[in-house]
Image (cartoon, rainbow, N blue to C red):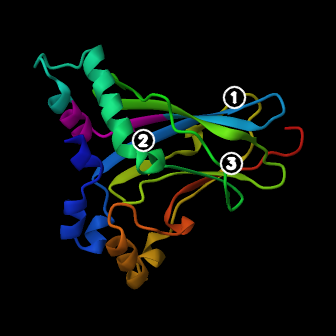
């Protein structure tokens, strides 16, 4: 069932382009960024809280013993299943220094728990292949699903940094303008329904710029 919730090729092929652009899974996201002694960014710690419907489905699908809760082994299975499913999507994480890709490693594990509201909480860490400086070009991070099936929502206070915090901005796409160009959007989805090749302007971006010495 998680496969279907995260991405279903058959589903996308049956939907119109506009329908495919509407999310079905909703995530409240937060992240903490590690910095080394030189002030360079070294890792991203993701914390994602999923919506009630998705969380209920996870409970139903993975409660093998039918006790109405997920034990440690069942939670491990959820984490492994999600990790396998979203690896194809680069774990919904894109990183840039300016416009250049800042390579980042896949997470070793994905930890899944339930919070006091019975919502699925997913945590994982991604480490940059090389520490990222931001004095010249900003670090840009996008947490987005290229298929638009999963919607991620960030608030300004959801971005935390180890050590001295640097200023950051969050840019949300202007979908009214972007979706008005239906030909580009349609071609992207039908050329590759699972992972349409869309420009950076279709994704939300967190941009961080640290002054020298900060």
Report if residue 133 is visible in the image: yes
Residue 118 placement (x, y as % from top left): 27, 26
Report if residue 119 is visible in the image: no
Q: Of label 2 and label 1, which has the lower sequence position?
A: 2
Give the residue at x 46% y 68%: 197
Quadrant of the image occupied by residue 2: top left
**Horizontally, is 85 left or right of 127 in the view?**
left
Quadrant of the image occupied by residue 78: top left
The residue tagged with tag 3: helix, strand or loop? strand
On screen, residue 18 above or below 58: below
Give the residue at x 58% y 55%: 205
Residue 42 placement (x, y as % from top left): 69, 35
Residue 203, label in figure: none
- For the N terminus, which image quadrant? top left
The residue tagged with tag 2: helix, strand or loop? strand
**Horizontally, is 154 left or right of 188 in the view?**
right
Residue 28, label in figure: 2
Provide the residue designation for mark 1. 162
Residue 33 placement (x, y as % from top left): 64, 35
Q: Is residue 64 magenta?
A: no
Q: Of label 3 and label 1, which has the lower sequence position?
A: 1
Provide the residue designation for mark 3. 168
Q: Residue furthest left?
A: 66
Give the residue at x 36% y 74%: 191
Region rendered in magenta? 47-58
Judged by depth in the image, the label closer to the viewer, 2 or 1, is 1
């Amino acid at each position: 069932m998680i496969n279907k919730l995260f991405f279903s090729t058959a589903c996308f092929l049956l939907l119109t382009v506009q329908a495919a652009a509407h999310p079905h899974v909703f995530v409240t996201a937060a992240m903490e960024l590690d910095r080394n002694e030189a002030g360079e960014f070294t890792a991203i710690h993701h914390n994602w809280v999923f919506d009630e419907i998705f969380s209920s489905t996870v409970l139903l699908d993975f409660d093998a013993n039918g006790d109405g809760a997920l034990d440690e082994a069942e939670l491990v299975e959820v984490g492994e299943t999600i990790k396998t499913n979203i690896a194809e999507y680069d774990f919904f994480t894109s990183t840039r220094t300016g416009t250049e890709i800042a390579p980042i490693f896949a997470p070793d594990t994905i930890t899944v728990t339930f919070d006091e509201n019975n919502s699925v909480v997913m945590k994982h860490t991604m480490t940059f292949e090389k520490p990222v400086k931001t004095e010249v070009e900003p670090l840009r991070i996008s947490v987005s699903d290229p298929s638009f099936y999963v919607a991620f929502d960030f608030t300004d206070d959801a971005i935390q940094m180890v050590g001295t915090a640097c200023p950051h901005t969050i840019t949300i796409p202007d979908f009214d303008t972007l979706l008005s160009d239906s030909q580009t959007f349609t071609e992207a989805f039908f050329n590759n329904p699972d992972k349409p090749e869309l420009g950076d302007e279709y994704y939300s971006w967190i941009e961080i710029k640290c002054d020298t010495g900060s």
